[in-house]
Amino acid sequence: MSNSDETEGGAGFPALSLTGRVALITGAASGIGRASARLMAARGAAVVLSDRDDPGDTAAEIKATGGQALALALDVATDDGAAAMTRSALDQFGRLDILHANAGISGPLNPDLTTGAADFAEILRINLIGPWLAICAALPHLGAGASVICTASVAGIRAGAGGIPYSASKAGVISLVQTVASATAGRGLRINAVAPGLVETGMTAPLYTDARARGREDRIGQLNPLRRGGEAQEIAELVAFLASDAASYINGQVIAADGGLTASLPVAPRPAGGHPGA
Ligand SMILES: NC(=O)c1ccc[n+]([C@@H]2O[C@H](COP(=O)([O-])OP(=O)(O)OC[C@H]3O[C@@H](n4cnc5c(N)ncnc54)[C@H](O)[C@@H]3O)[C@@H](O)[C@H]2O)c1
């Protein structure tokens, strides 16, 4: 554990504070990545925001409120892009402690049994190889106490929440954190995955727009026990926790933030008092 002098909630409790840390967040121009960058900056981290859409607005907003931020417009899922992100973090802030490998695309949402090699490969490139390249570039610079968080998805845990290439890519992300946690044993760094359920972001905007246009917004998230969709800030809270010393014994895990969706079997609603399974 590092920064153990920073405590919250009383002496001896590990802190959620990220003061003195440098965090690199991919896909930070929008949605979950933007919320993660904002929250980690608010908790004291210097943040490097990368996205193929210029994340300059979010970086400027963080700087305007007294934070430290650097914006990079690049494709994060290339060897050059991954190397440039890490190099820029080190050049600008002198160290790297936290990587949130988050950039992703959905591809076709409906069950699609016809996706060809090029389209499938592009989803894997961005969603799975992208995090891998970011991890490879960052690892030599991550010391004890460092934390890597990858954004997976409930679609990587069970079927039904995304297209087939997307779901396969997210299952791969879960395997990635497990295998990298094992491969980096003894170094004192942690790597975990967050698995969001449905969250309103740029990626899901068409779904929300369509539901609102049809007056069906109240149907969003009805399959999870909280009966609502999530907000990017709710995923960012989990990411920032995993980035902090408060999560110092959590490693190699996938943690869902999905309103309880993956905890429930998809059974038909029963009348009150109905026999289980009836
Ligand atoms: N929104 C959801 O319901 C949901 C659920 C589960 C998982 N996720 C995952 O959360 C992550 C963030 O997505 P979001 O929902 O915030 O969507 P989003 O579209 O709002 O944000 C994704 C960002 O990634 C960027 N990006 C995509 N490919 C890139 C590339 N090659 N290089 C650089 N930047 C790239 C996009 O420009 C965008 O800004 C994704 O990995 C997504 O799969 C989202």
Image (spheres, helix red, strand yellow):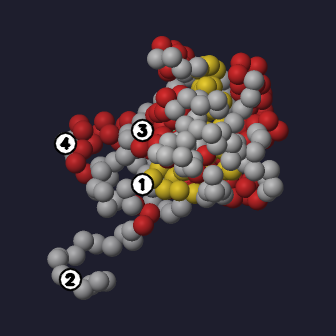
Cα–Cα span, label 1 and label 3 = 13 Å
Residue 32, horizontal then vertical, whole percent: 48, 37
Residue 156 against residue 91 in the figure, above or below = below
Residue 33, horizontal then vertical, whole percent: 52, 34
Q: Are marks 1 and 2 in contact (CB under 8 Å)?
A: no
Residue that carries the numbered disc 2 in the rendered image: 274
**Label 2 SS:** loop
**Label 3 SS:** helix
Q: Earlier in the sequence, mark 2 or mark 3?
A: 3
Q: Are marks 4 and 1 in contact (CB under 8 Å)?
A: no
Cα–Cα span, label 4 and label 3 = 25 Å
Residue that carries the numbered disc 1 in the rendered image: 258
Describe residue 186's horizontal placement relative to residue 43 as left or right: right
Q: Nearer the viewer, residue 61 or 94?
A: 94
**Label 4 SS:** loop
- Total label count? 4
Identified at 42% across, 54% down, the residue is 258
